[in-house]
Image (spheres, helix red, strand yellow):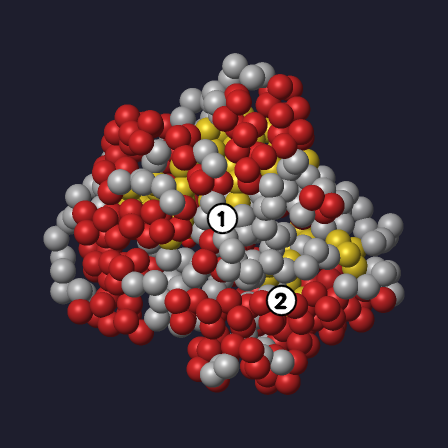
Amino acid sequence: MPFKVKKKILKLKESSTLVINEKSKELISKGKKIYQFGFGQSPFPVPDTIVDSLKKNAYRKEYLPIQGLPELREEISKYLLKRTGNDYPKENILITPGSKEAMLLIHLAFNGEIIIPAPGWVSYEPQAEIGSNKVHWLKTLRSNNWFPTSQELEKKIKSVGKNKNLILILNSPNNPSGTTCNNLMELAKVAKKYKILILSDEIYTDLTFSNDYSSISKFYPELTFITSGLSKWCGAGGWRLGFLAVPKKLTEFLRSLKSLASESYSTVNTPTQYASIEAYANDHELYKLKVRAILKAVGNYVYENLKSNKILIAPPQGAFYLMPEFKNKKYKTSSQLCETILDETGVAMLPGSDFGFKPSKMLTRLSYTDFDGFEFFRNVTNCRQIDDEMIKKFAPNVVEGVSKLSNWAKNL
Ligand code: PMP
Ligand code: GLU
């Protein structure tokens, strides 16, 4: 009896971020020197107090409520109030196995269409397709920091049809560009005018280098969902803890999400939920300052040493990515470009075509996290003293990879 797969599922590939991670590891195990600039994972240790809390709670084995541990939801609610000025009460927070799952649940439940500014993270479009929601990419320019202008958003809404049910996905600081959105208020105004929903992916919020992070929910709390979690700011991607905050006006929608959660993962694992209370009850400001300072210094190093007449890049403003654009006529697609670079230099990156760009646009995503974050973190005592010498000492793969890449580009 053949196993028949649904057409829309057959079309899916394995997510390119996870594939490049596995591919890089495989090449390394075969003895090849690889600069792992493909996968986006925080290299830093999880704060000790959070790890201790996980250890203390490892004995807990009972299932928790579908929606998540109430004490954890309460702490997240307080964190969001501080961060955004908005009240997302604990009743409106859903704990999920990573924020990726929270977004998937939205797509499964939501009946409408999705606007995604390009660049947009690799999983947004496939998730929308899994949920049978049509995707509309919205082109952005480097001149507006790789975010749409309010006019561009309005034009897109009108062309899609202003009476449609629409969600705009917004991610600042952005994966893959590493830039932050300067015009949140203007975008919020347009969203408000057409009453479209916003899904604000704030997984990199605490890695905003300028530290003046702002959430679009400040300007449009009534219809903005927020997703975030532990994966990026505290280095706990593998713990798989995320959350969704649902605006009060849409509380009803949460019922469907909870049903989906209960029929799939049931509830997130218990010890991690208890440990995460510690992650949100304290602000971990010193830890965050240090993580941001290291990432900012390494990001700037890569930016300064890579930008040239052959490579265009916007300066790093948050997260741990940069989006170099290679000026050349030799390669037809960004995938071909990335494959050649990997072959000839050992530098692994992802093509811009995975992030909503036309394949012919020579953009790539570079993740500058290929260093021992434990060592680097331990050796930083003064955030203002992270100079090139320290970067060479504690992030040698980044330094070497950047030099290989920049030399390679000279021959373009
Ligand atoms: N959004 C973006 C932009 C990301 O880069 C990631 C990285 N995994 C996620 C969401 C999902 O993170 P997680 O599921 O680990 O919370
Ligand atoms: N967010 C990471 C990235 O963009 C990887 C994790 C994932 O895709 O789930 O590389």
- Mark 2 against mark 1, which lies toward the viewer? 1
Q: Secondary structure at mark 1?
A: loop
> What residue is drawn where x is 41% and y is 30%?
223
> What residue is drawn where x is 67% and y is 30%?
152
Q: In this figure, which residue is indicated by the disc labeled 1? A: 214
As displayed, is residue 28 above or below residue 322? below
Res 173 seen here = yes
As displayed, is residue 174 above or below residue 248? below
Quadrant containing the N terminus in the rendered view? top left
Q: In this figure, which residue is indicated by the disc labeled 2? A: 299
As displayed, is residue 356 above or below residue 279? above
Q: Is residue 261 left or right of residue 144?
A: left
Q: Dot 1, how many residues are within 10 Å of its Cα: few (below 14), some (14-19), or many (20+)? A: many
Q: Amino acid at mark 1?
A: Ser
Q: Amino acid at mark 2?
A: Gly
Q: How many circles with numbers are drawn on the protein?
A: 2
Q: Could you tell me residue 362's position as x and y percent? A: 76, 50
